[in-house]
Image (spheres, rainbow, N blue to C red):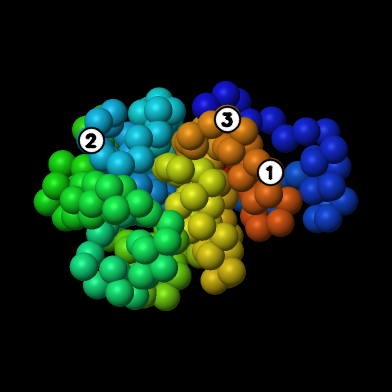
Amino acid sequence: MSDYIPSAQLQARVVARRGQLHAFTHMAPQRTALVVVDMQNAFVKEGAGHAWVPAAAATCDAINRLAEALRHKGGTVVWILNTFTEESLHSWSHFHEYLSSPAGLKLRSETMAAGHEGHALYADLHAQPNDWQVRKTRYSAFIQGSSDLHERLQKEGIDTLLIAGTATNVCCESTARDAMMLNYKTVMISDACSAFTPQEHVASLDSFLLNFGDVQTTSEVMTLLRASQH
């Protein structure tokens, strides 16, 4: 995606609302998690699934650099895996019945099932053995019944989340908004997220910056990490 630069008008609204552009200017790495959303083959690798995002592969370098920097500082890296289950056909039936074509549902159910190539993390991502891998069954990893992510983060005393992955305006934003509502300090990483179009990417980040949390670049977050104490 192209560099995200909020308009002067939006910046003025944000500053008027909270007194500064960036809500979070300090970071405690050991209470911070990088939550990487849906960077699986079905979304990142052309032809591997139902919802390829052409810009997603280009974010792998930023995600890897940020993950390594956070691990070095004692933080947590979480890989979220969008997962189809038979149960969701019933508990999320309106999505499957009204918002998916029969062909689309068939492709999604096959490629997002655990064990399928489409479900696996994209090969260019450098996941490590101590990282978490958490399956979710909804757009948001935090909505009730989607995953156990909230409980696990609370158990570890994590209160700050860095959101990366794809798509910016769908699963990333859904997860980030719910995180903020659950009282996490939440930052969407603009150059580590991707969407189907630049317009969708920017609109999502604009809304989040104004109303829900912070938007920073990988470089900005890494500067905060370097300045922090272990």
Q: Position of residue 47 (x, y in %)?
A: 25, 31
Q: Earlier in the sequence, mark 2 or mark 1?
A: 2
Q: Which mark is drawn over residue 198?
A: 3
Position above or below: 15 against 88: above
Q: CA distance from mark 1 to mark 3?
A: 12 Å
Amino acid under disc 1: Asp
* Amino acid on which disc 2 is placed: Ala
* Residue position marked by numbered label 1 in the rendering: 206
Under tag 3, what secondary structure? helix
Q: Nearer the viewer, mark 1 or mark 3?
A: 3
Report the front residue among 213 and 67. Answer: 213
Q: Residue at x 35, y 51 (%)?
A: 101
Quarter occupied by residue 118: top left
Q: Amino acid at mark 3?
A: Pro
Q: CA distance from mark 3 to mark 2?
A: 22 Å
Say few, some or many: other residues with alpha carbon within 10 Å of mark 3 (under 14 / 14 to 19 / 20 or more): some
SS type, badge 1: helix
Circle on res. 48: 2
Q: Is residue 87 left or right of residue 16?
A: left
